[in-house]
Image (cartoon, rainbow, N blue to C red):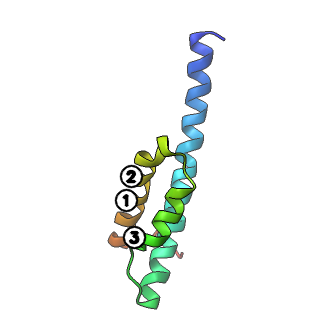
Amino acid sequence: MGIEEARSLIDELDAKIVALLEERLELCRRLGEEKRRLGLGLRDEDREAEVLGRVPSRWRPLYRLVIEECLREQARGGFRGGV
């Protein structure tokens, strides 16, 4: 495999990763709306620990950032459309 082919494959993977992160963020928006409707707090440390426990340790720092961004989005009440 050459450099250009490898870079092209990486670009494809990056696009898929971003699409999945956007999908996750949309689900978190919906979850945040439901939490507010039920009068619950946005942060659930037990759930965060459960999620992080499924992530390989080398990716946990990155995944913590993903969780924090989802929480920020929930706190902003950032909902699109009629979700």
Q: Secondary structure at mark 1?
A: helix
In the displayed structure, 69 sits above or below 34; it is: above
Amino acid carrying label 1: it is Glu
Residue for badge 1: 68
Q: Residues within 10 Å of mark 3 (few under 14, many from 20)?
A: many
Q: Residue furthest bottom?
A: 38
Q: Secondary structure at mark 2?
A: helix
Q: Secondary structure at mark 3?
A: helix
Confirm or deny contact between disc 1 and disc 2 (CB under 8 A).
yes
Residue for badge 2: 65
In the displayed structure, does residue 1 sit left or right of residue 37?
A: right
Q: Quadrant of the N terminus?
A: top right
In the displayed structure, 53 sits above or below 57; it is: below
Question: Where residue 42 sits in the image (x, y, percent)?
Answer: 39, 76
Amino acid carrying label 2: it is Leu
> Residue 43 is drawn in which quadrant?
bottom left
Residue 74's label in the rendered image is 3
Amino acid carrying label 3: it is Gln
* Number of residue marks: 3
In the displayed structure, does residue 1 sit left or right of residue 60?
A: right
Question: Where residue 80 sits in the image (x, y, percent)?
Answer: 47, 68
